[in-house]
């Protein structure tokens, strides 16, 4: 999946579910004016297309690739059939959906009550949690669209973080230099989302690490 690719359009019939492995996708709500705001991100912890097993088959949001990478794609019929079995995947998908809803609620509160700099710290931390590197390739437009702010606001906030020695920022690239500093600069929203994701899916991470060690 390439940077900026759109996987879902608002109101469109979902044909596939996506399980990102190295890609990260932003779920965006797009207003009639064309302005957008991010409501959540999905990386290697989750799935795109929860509407398929929740019974809706459509979504009012769009899904845009914020970090290029790979994902597994599964036809909707196969996902629905497996979910209907009521076995392990059924439980995992429901738990992940709860974690995703938590991120959506917390993002809405963060966008309303916290500064652009705090929001950028939160977004960077959540993004880093889904990557195996401290380097992020993205665009100002995507970051601004995800945070629901002007490009100039992103430039100012990123400049402040760079002057503080927390990141190195150049056109199209962000390098995290001081993660602990970002955590101090973020609001409580990052920790709420991180803890809930860990609480609900820690057993999945354990199985993944065990399998990797066995290999």
Image (cartoon, helix red, strand yellow):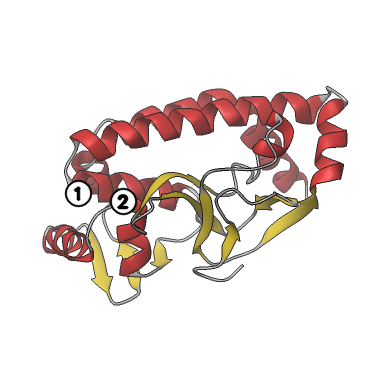
Marks 1 and 2 close (CB-CB < 8 Å): yes
From the viewer's perspective, tell me whether residue 186 is left or right of residue 39: left
Location of residue 12 with respect to 175 vertically, above or below: above
Residue shown at the point (74%, 52%) measured from the top left: 16
Using the image as rendered, state which of residue 171 and residue 15 is in the foreground: 15
Q: Check disc 1 and report the residue beneath it.
A: 116
Provide the secondary structure element on which disc 1 rests: helix
Neighbours of disc 1 within 10 Å: few (<14), some (14-19), many (20+): many
List x then y, in percent, for residue 33. 33, 57
Residue shown at the point (66%, 25%) measured from the top left: 94
Asked if one can make out residue 194 in the rendered structure from this viewpoint, the answer is: no
Residue shown at the point (19%, 34%) measured from the top left: 113
Provide the secondary structure element on which disc 2 rests: helix
Q: In which quarter of the image is the N terminus?
A: bottom right
From the viewer's perspective, tell me whether residue 133 is left or right of residue 119: right
List x then y, in percent, for residue 166. 21, 57
The count of marks equals 2
Neighbours of disc 2 within 10 Å: few (<14), some (14-19), many (20+): many
From the viewer's perspective, tell me whether residue 149 is left or right of residue 107: left
List x then y, in percent, for residue 189. 31, 32
Residue shown at the point (82%, 36%) measured from the top left: 80
Using the image as rendered, state which of residue 167 and residue 171 is in the foreground: 171
User: How far, Cα to Cα, is label 1 from label 2?
Assistant: 8 Å
Given the current orientation, which residue lies at the most extreme front position?
Answer: 32
Asked if one can make out residue 148 in the rendered structure from this viewpoint, the answer is: yes
Q: Check disc 2 and report the residue beneath it.
A: 147
């Amino acid at each position: 999946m390439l940077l900026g690719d759109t996987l879902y359009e608002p109101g469109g019939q979902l044909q596939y579910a996506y399980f990102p492995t190295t890609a990260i996708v932003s779920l965006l709500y797009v207003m009639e004016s064309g302005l957008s705001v991010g409501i959540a991100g999905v990386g290697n912890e989750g799935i795109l297309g929860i509407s398929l097993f929740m019974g809706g088959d459509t979504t009012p949001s769009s899904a845009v690739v914020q970090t290029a990478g790979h994902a597994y794609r599964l036809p909707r019929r196969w996902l629905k059939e497996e979910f209907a079995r009521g076995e392990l995947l059924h439980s995992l998908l429901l738990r992940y959906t709860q974690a995703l809803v938590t991120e959506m609620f917390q993002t809405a509160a963060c966008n309303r009550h916290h500064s652009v700099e705090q929001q950028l710290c939160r977004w960077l931390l959540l993004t880093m949690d889904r990557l195996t590197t401290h380097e992020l390739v993205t665009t100002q437009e995507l970051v601004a669209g995800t945070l629901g702010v002007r490009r100039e606001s992103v430039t100012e906030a990123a400049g402040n973080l760079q002057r503080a020695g927390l990141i190195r920022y150049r056109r199209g690239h962000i390098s995290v230099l001081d993660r602990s500093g970002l955590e101090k600069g973020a609001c409580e929203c990052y920790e709420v989302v991180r803890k809930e994701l860990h609480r609900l899916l820690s057993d999945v991470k354990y199985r993944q690490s065990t399998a990797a060690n066995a290999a």
